[in-house]
Amino acid sequence: MDSHQSSRLQDDPDLKVMMAGSTLRKVKSRSWKKQRHFRLLEDGLTIWYKSRWAGRGHSTFSVSEVEAVREGHQSEVLLSIADEFPAHLCLTLVFHGRQGNLDLVAESPEEAQAWIRGVRKLIHKAETMDEKERLDQWVLDWFQKADKNKDGRMNFKEVRKLLKMMNVEMNEEHAFHLFTMADRSESGSLEIEQFVHFYKMLTQRDEVWKVFQEYSGDGEKLTLEELENFLTQEQQEGECSGQHAQELMNRYEPSETAKKQGAMSLDGFQMYLCSQEGSIFKPEHRQLHQDMSQPLSHYFISSSHNTYLLEDQLRGQSSLEAYIQALKRGCRCVEVDCWDGSDGEPVVYHGHTWTSKILFKDVIATVKEYAFKTSDFPVILSLENHCCVEQQTVMAQHLKQILGDTLQRTLLDGQVPEQLPSPQELKGKILLKAKKIGRLEESCDGTVTDEMSDEEDMANGDADNPCAEQPSAERQKKSKSKLSSELSDLVVYCKSIHFHGFEHARLHSKCYEMSSFSESKAKKLAKDAGTDFVQYNTKQLSRIYPSGLRTDSSNYNPQELWSVGCQIVALNFQTAGLEMDLNDGLFSQNGCCGYVLKPEFMRDGNTTFDPEKPAERRAPRPLRFSIQVISGQQLPKVNQKEGSIVDPLVRVEVYGVPQDQAKAETNYIHNNGFNPVWDETLNFVISTPELALVRFVVEDYDKASRNDFIGQFTLPFTCIQAGYRHIHLLSKDGTAIPPSSVFVNISISELT
């Protein structure tokens, strides 16, 4: 950050308060409330805090990790102490990904406001930085980390330490050579400007320079025509490459002189390649671009299982925050597991376990508040109903009172539909998925048989559920139980029914009737009757949920079930890993709206597609997918121990129909996480590109034990841009870790 920017920070009254520091109470529960000293460091980006008593121990986090600031009693923790601390003293910092909130109480309303406004300004600044400012900020952060004695200068010893911190293994001679070249004043130390020069020499990208040289006539710059050639030949851009070349020059060329000459320098070229436009993801596919006017059954729908849990299913915390996190991730189907509360108020938790309980009405209020912040398209409330009739009626009243017109309670045009309405028609609406008395076509007397919750329904005789053995008397008692007609009346387009086979569904089922399947039942159906399942899913919704044995909230691979057209493939959003990477990858397209249109051959009721035999589809030829893995940039350290440096390798994994599943990896590079060069090509053949997802994983090789995860990026095959591209890596949690990336050259062609 330049000194001008730094002085702007000091001029802002709120940031002045933050830089001077404040004593704030950190609150974890009603009984855990401790004073901590918080302050904003000089970089304007790092918040530092420590206990008043702890010796040298302190913690820091970056403003870029904070997603939002909530004001007042806006978290369960702060609500629980509302009687002790008034709302005007309270604030909550919400972090990206799965990191827990930070609940704070200030000593005065003025101080609370300064922190609320100040952090919001800093978040806004971090979000609106362009590529160059972001990189400058990154360099400045490193400078300040390494400048131990805070004299604004860095000697060679400090530089050597810094290289280790940055994951660079470099022989001393080379490092000293770069240091003396940067030390123009020959003072034996570098000031910030000289350090930027040192950093530039360090990060000089020979592999980018080579590509630049191939297209540059004079080796110094690219003319408009040369840039256009590059876009046409390497990046496989068609007609509009001329216009695009001009736009890229205007956007990324830092030198005004070069711009005036209609040219792009190496710096500008590198900046374009490192930008979102130079990334592997087609920018036009990031936007909402699909037809949203087809029946709901024609879309994959981002769906969460046991949404109320933040951890595992035996002892985990039930929390409203879990609903907020899922909805913010674009989830469009959330699960609400309802049980009788002791005082007539239904509660939500994982029944018969030690998980904590939350009130049903609070869950509904939270869903109402957060349902449409990320996406306007409908949210499905999947109700697991274990309540008595009286408490079901209380649930119905809460749903009507809290959700009001947001709840879709009637047929859109008064007609019983032949096919489900579209996401477009249901924009801004919440749908209830639950049991219903009778059919939409008739009215009934209030008694319903076979009244079990979906997951128990499937659990009977389901080998992967430990609760499956219900005594038959209890089962009979349950099946005669009543369903509240008030609750039943709120179910319109998502009526839960028992699945009696594909033939029965073809003859008798209505489009608004849907079934839930355990992962094992669904996988068996997918394997034994793939085409029937695909056809069934053109008309009706199906929901898949994890096995009851997954008490650790682990996940199953959703791809196998998307491949037969299942729409609501519910995952434990609280558990990071491969399966959630695939879910985030599929739904990262189409504006992250939580709905992705299925391929055409999965929307036709007479389709003959079977993922087990994809070749039988009269499809275009399979595609050859080739990735030249060139280099890596500034990979994060896995092990924070002083001397450790990573040995990175890149693995490319393809998920899709069984025939397309494949993995290949590069060799590992010894001791270089800063700028490893692999220059290896990995090849794949893809028969059904419309269903394929590609996951790029970077790992730290370890010959003695499992490799450590460094970063990953997953995207649909159809969203991949060919040519020279950067893959911007994400953490295990799915959050960005700039500027870590992998540089690749991708080619996609028909298999001949």
Image (cartoon, helix red, strand yellow):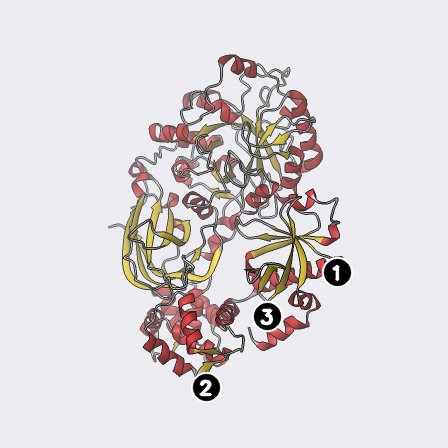
The x and y percentages for residue 705 are 32, 49
The x and y percentages for residue 294 are 51, 39
Q: Disc 2 designates what residue?
A: 187
Whole-number angstrom distance, CA of label 1 to CA of label 2: 46 Å
The x and y percentages for residue 504 are 44, 20
Q: Nearer the viewer, residue 550 or 376?
A: 550
Q: Secondary structure at mark 3?
A: loop
| Image mark for residue 136 | none
Q: Secondary structure at mark 1?
A: helix
Judge left or right: residue 657 versus residue 472.
left
Q: Kindly identify the residue that appears in the image at 58 percent across and 19 percent down.
A: 438
- Where 744 sits versus 462, above or below? below
Q: Is any part of residue 719 visible from this angle? A: no
| Image mark for residue 42 | 3
Judge the density around disc 1: few (<14), some (14-19), many (≥20) Cα neighbours within 10 Å.
Answer: some
Label 3 sits on what residue type? Glu
Label 1 sits on what residue type? Glu
- Where 166 sits versus 687, above or below? below
Figure quadrant of residue 64: bottom right
Q: Secondary structure at mark 2?
A: loop
Label 2 sits on what residue type? Ser
Q: Disc 1 designates what residue?
A: 110
Whole-number angstrom distance, CA of label 3 to CA of label 2: 25 Å
